């Protein structure tokens, strides 16, 4: 119908911008995007900020400070200190930046001479190693003795453990052999009586002395008196005899507490303590510095007794 009215259209919001009509070549989805105004780029913003920095004002403020510092450095470089005739002269060679310092003329001048030999640290290390070796040498010898006589070490620890167990004492630890000095020991409860302490420490001594003499006497006396030939049995007898003799005396960890308990008993007028005080103190002194001295004393005593049996 020619007289038909236009369809009713909703009112558009006032804020909606009016879009220009799209051309025939422009796609509809491109024409529908809103167009925004583009600001300056990030590079332009950074350049603007750098140009806004007051470089000239900062340079003018720093110029007096730089000049005063340079003047002070030049003044310090020209100072020569001379007291008591000792003058420090510094000469910088032209070929390289080598500073040569010559200190002379003065009684209070420290002169340092560096030798080209072994450095001080190397000499100090050698001296320390030498002292450590000297201190460790007795322990090394004692460990060698224990390794040589390990049967006696095991037997002594076993006898000591048996005596302490029969005495009814609580036993904390038993070590039959370890490469140390002492090599074998028994950690037990402190005995309440001196007689018990003497039994635990010196019954193994008595047993080992008897075994040492029984091994050394047949190996030494017939050979010296009857001039009999030696064989492997003689070597085994000598080895066992020397092992038992070297470990017959107790260690200081065993003899020391017995000597102290005897000293306390003397104050209380205990007759056993009075009788045992001097022998206990002698054994404690012999065993105080390791197992070397007790081993020498035991070997000499058993050797003399073994050779004196048939003479």
Image: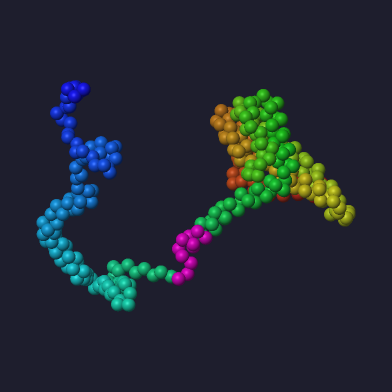
Q: Any magenta on residue 311?
A: no
Would residue 274 be seen by someone viewing this image from the given angle? no
Residue 270 drawn at (x, y percent): 60, 28
Q: Is residue 68 above or below residue 143?
A: below
Is 216 above or below relative to 68?
above
Q: Is residue 248 left or right of residue 54?
A: right
Instruction: Identify the residue at horizontal 69%, vertical 37% (top origin).
Output: 176
Predominant SS of the magenta segment: helix
The boundaries of the magenta stretch are 116-126
Foreground of the two, 20 or 5 = 5
| Colour theme | rainbow
Left or right: residue 273 compared with residue 210: left
- Residue 88 visible in the displayed image: yes
- State the count of labels: 0
Question: Which residue, as the protein is rendered here, is positioned at the far front?
Answer: 2
Instruction: Please provide percent x and percent y for residue 68.
Output: 14, 63
Identify the residue at image location x=41%, y=69%. Answer: 114
Reply yes or no: does residue 122 show up in magenta: yes
Residue 108 sits above or below residue 176 on the image: below
Residue 71, quarter of the rendered image: bottom left
Instruction: State whether residue 253 is above or below residue 87.
Output: above
At a point 29% along the width and 74% down the height, the residue shown is 92
Q: Residue at x 32, y 77 (%)?
A: 95
Q: Nearer the viewer, residue 231 or 115?
A: 115
Left/right of residue 230 with respect to residue 135 in the rendered view: right
Q: Who is closer to the viewer here, 169 or 216? A: 169
Q: Quadrant of the N terminus?
A: top left
Question: Could you say where residue 27 lies in the image, as x and y percent from the top left?
Answer: 29, 40
Image location of residue 260, percent across then percent down? 57, 35
């Amino acid at each position: 119908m020619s007289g038909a009215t236009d369809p009713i259209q909703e009112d558009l919001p006032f804020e909606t911008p009016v879009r220009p009509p799209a051309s025939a070549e422009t796609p509809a989805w491109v024409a529908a995007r809103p167009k925004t105004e583009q600001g300056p780029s990030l590079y332009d913003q950074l350049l603007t900020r750098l140009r806004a920095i007051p470089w000239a004002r900062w340079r003018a403020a720093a110029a007096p400070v730089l000049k005063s510092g340079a003047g002070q450095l030049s003044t310090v470089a020209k100072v020569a200190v001379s007291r008591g005739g000792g003058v420090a002269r510094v000469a910088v060679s032209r070929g390289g930046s080598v500073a040569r310092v010559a200190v002379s003329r003065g009684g209070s001048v420290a002169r340092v001479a560096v030798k080209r030999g072994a450095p001080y640290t190397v000499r100090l290390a050698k001296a320390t190693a030498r002292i450590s070796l000297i201190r460790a040498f007795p322990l090394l010898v004692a460990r060698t003795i224990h390794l040589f006589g390990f049967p006696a070490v095991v037997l002594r620890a076993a006898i000591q453990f048996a005596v302490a167990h029969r005495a009814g004492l609580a036993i904390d630890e038993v070590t039959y052999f370890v490469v140390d000095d002492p090599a074998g020991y028994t950690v037990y409860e402190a005995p309440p009586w001196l007689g018990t302490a003497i039994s635990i420490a010196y019954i193994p001594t008595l047993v080992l002395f008897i075994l040492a003499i029984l091994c050394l006497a047949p190996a030494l006396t017939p050979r010296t008196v009857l001039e009999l030939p030696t064989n492997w049995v003689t070597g085994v007898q000598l080895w066992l005899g020397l092992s038992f003799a070297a470990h017959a005396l107790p260690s200081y960890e065993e003899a020391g507490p017995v000597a102290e308990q005897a000293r306390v008993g003397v104050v209380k007028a205990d007759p056993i303590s009075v009788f045992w005080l001097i022998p206990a103190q002698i054994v404690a002194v012999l065993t105080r510095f390791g197992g070397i001295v007790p081993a020498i004393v035991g070997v000499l005593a058993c050797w003399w007794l073994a050779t004196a049996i048939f003479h």
